[in-house]
Image (cartoon, grey):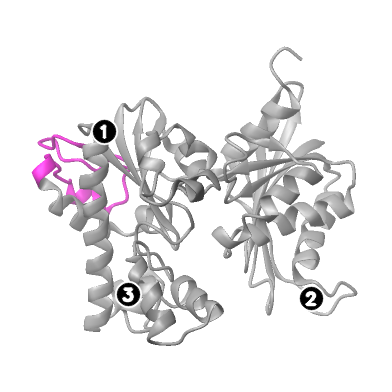
Amino acid sequence: MQAILILNSGSSSIKFAVFALERETMRKEYTGIVVNIIQKPHLKIKASSGEVIINKKLSETTLINDPYTRATEEILHWLQLQQINVIAAGHRVAHGGVHYNRATVINDEVITNLEELKPLAPLHQPYNLNGIKILQKKFPKIFQVACLDTAFHTTCNPLSQLFAIPKWLTEKGVRRYGFHGLSYDYVVSQFDKFIIAHLGQGATMCAVHNRKSVATSIGFSALDGLPMGTRCGCLDAGVVLYLLDQEKMTYPEIEKTLYKESGLLGVSGGISSDMKELLESSNKDAKTAIDLFIYRICSWIGALTAELQGLDGLIFTAGIGENAPYIREKVCEQIAWLGAKIDKDANNSGQHEIHHPDSKLLLYTIPTDEEVTIAKETFALINPVGK
């Protein structure tokens, strides 16, 4: 069986999917993940039916020293045992900068350009590129495609992409970009003026009009916008100057604070970055973290609605968006001024359509599937129109 391998390589896990190719069509055959890559790697693979095929711990002692290479090799070995011939690979890449506004065939120049963007998404970009390099070393001639999270947002209002900074900095690419574009691309469909809330460990929001991104909550780096699991979200630049001048913090210390010690984890006083644990906690700091998260979501809904000049509905997606009824309910209560009214029974039972019959806004919970978007973009480049 010939197939496309989809890789979403992260710092502690590698998600993957396998799409079988038949003539000019493709279908998802398998999905999987390797978690706890560094210390206790564990592989889980499911068939498209949902049946779990593999669920096992991986050996920590092998001839391969690099844990990411080891995890990827385990995936490739399993594919080989299934007689799956991987002819192409599509990769989720967080940041495309000013160079790339669409999925791009990978070559050395592309890798070099994407390497330069590591400081803008240090929790994602290095690991995304790591997956590309591992496959490139294993299969030097394999057809690989970079699918950029930022590409979806290149249709945003040009003014919304600008910071009020010196022009020479803007010309160097210091501007708002936006992320989670692969998720948004999957979720948008027949809707007109919608806001999509991708709420998870990474959290962003996007205003969509006619299936195109108009504005988004996140900007130049993966720190902007909503508070996230461990990232701060919107922050006065003066705070960074204060940390440098008054607290005498170094660049690495500031980076660690803003990327790994802030967000839900920081506001909760170190209780957790996991929304499920915070919702189960009776600690007042956990409640503060939850309340701030909801407050910022609602603030962004107001801003994005103004950008759209109206709103037809709101879509919740990703880990928190799909699995936290309390968050959805409280958000909808706070935007009642827009005409939102949630159906509590539908919301609590996990239905996709969660608006009350009296609601003026359409409200949905829609699971995202970034792998499908990556597969489609990769497939399109393998089979260009008019080939």
Q: Badge 2: few (under 14), some or many (20 or more) residues near its Cα, within 10 Å?
A: few
Please tell me which residue lies in front, 30 or 167. Answer: 167
The N terminus, quarter of image: top right
User: Residue drawn 63% across and 41% down?
Assistant: 147
How far from the left and from the top, in percent, is residue 166?
A: 43, 50
Residue type at numbered disc 1: Leu
Q: Main secondary structure of the magenta part?
A: loop
How far from the left and from the top, in percent, is residue 63?
A: 90, 74
Mark 1 or mark 2, whichever is nearer to me = 1
Residue at numbered disc 2: 59
Of labels 3 and 1, earlier in sequence is 3
Real-space Cα distance between discs 3 and 1? 33 Å
- Element on which disc 2 rests: loop
Q: Is residue 284 above or below residue 89?
A: below
- Element on which disc 3 rests: helix
Residue at numbered disc 3: 278
Residue type at numbered disc 2: Ser
User: Residue drawn 39% across and 74% down?
Assistant: 241
| Picture disc at residue 308 | 1
Tell me which segment is drawn in magenta. Answer: 337-364
Mark 3 or mark 2, whichever is nearer to me = 3
How far from the left and from the top, in percent, is residue 29?
A: 68, 41
Q: Is residue 253 magenta?
A: no
